[in-house]
Image (tube, grey):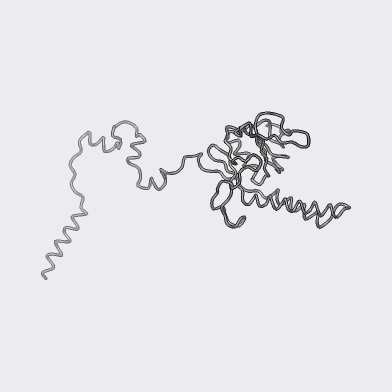
Amino acid sequence: MRLLPLFAMAMASSVGAFQQQPKAPLTQNAKKQAFHPSPRPGTPLTKADMVAIRSPFWNALNNPKAPPKGTVDYVVDRDYSVALTLICVGLWLNLFHPSEYMFIDMLGGAFHLWFGSFIGMQTMRTRAVFRKDTFELKTVTNKFLGIQKDKSLKPKEYQNYVLGTNNKWRYDTFVNWDFFPSINLPILVYFKETQTPKHMQIKGSIGGHQMDRRDNGQMHWFPAFANAKQLREQFEANGCKKVGPVHGEEFTEND
């Protein structure tokens, strides 16, 4: 019985907590500020004002530490078309012997199988990467190539096998780029740059004929182990200079 008065007092205080407290009448200035969250009533809200009244979930939806657009690496998808074509040609030569000389067929088939396997290995381990200011060739760090997704990328262990330089070129040094024999049937990717010092540039030759007689940069070639359409999009998006139309589109009529 002694607990009943205490219980009644607790209930009365709990109900009072939910009752609306009487408010003092608002002055004219207070009314304006109540309907204008801006510290300057009558003026539009600024970005700082919006940040001041933003939702508590703002940071969850808008990460202030997110990297700015253009600094994230763009990794071009790999393309096994060249490697598989070479391997299929090698199998065809070894199995069907299309010429009259079996030895030549076997030798040609063995070469195509070896070269196709080599290109396939490069396709599994090498990635064409477009960064903010540079085009790079990098190596995947996966233990099992071709099975797992790319865990991470690292600079290639070996420098450029022709020049001995790093496989990293700035976009503003590009002179030209293209695909051979065409963008629709890419086997080789070509580009020329002026980043390589002139005393290190190698023009190359076929027999007694120099491949590049123009003194305007260093040529580079690599198998089309990366998606050619994506390569083209990134070359153009990053402002790499181009001379003439892309191979395969010379006779395309403009709409």
Q: Nearer the viewer, residue 235 or 116?
A: 116
- Find the residue positioned furthest to the front: 199
Q: Residue at 61% across / 48% down in the picture?
A: 126
Q: Quadrant of residue 6?
A: bottom left
* Percent coordinates x, y for residue 22 in the rendering: 18, 46
* Percent coordinates x, y for residue 166 in the rendering: 59, 41
Q: Quadrant of residue 180?
A: top right
- Find the residue positioned furthest to the top: 215
- Find the residue positioned furthest to the bottom: 1
Q: Quadrant of residue 216?
A: top right
* Percent coordinates x, y for residue 119 in the rendering: 68, 49
- Find the residue positioned furthest to the right: 100
Q: Which image quarter is the C terminus in?
A: top right
Q: Residue at 35% across / 47% down in the picture?
A: 56
Q: Nearer the viewer, residue 159 or 68?
A: 159
Q: Is residue 23 left or right of residue 39?
A: left
Q: Is residue 119 left or right of residue 90?
A: left
Q: Is residue 139 left or right of residue 4?
A: right
Q: Residue at 77% across / 55% down in the picture?
A: 91
Q: Is residue 27 above or below residue 92?
A: above
Q: Nearer the viewer, residue 132 or 142?
A: 142
* Percent coordinates x, y for residue 132 in the rendering: 53, 38
Q: Which image quarter is the N terminus in?
A: bottom left
Number of numbered discs present? 0
Q: Is residue 71 above or below residue 89?
A: above
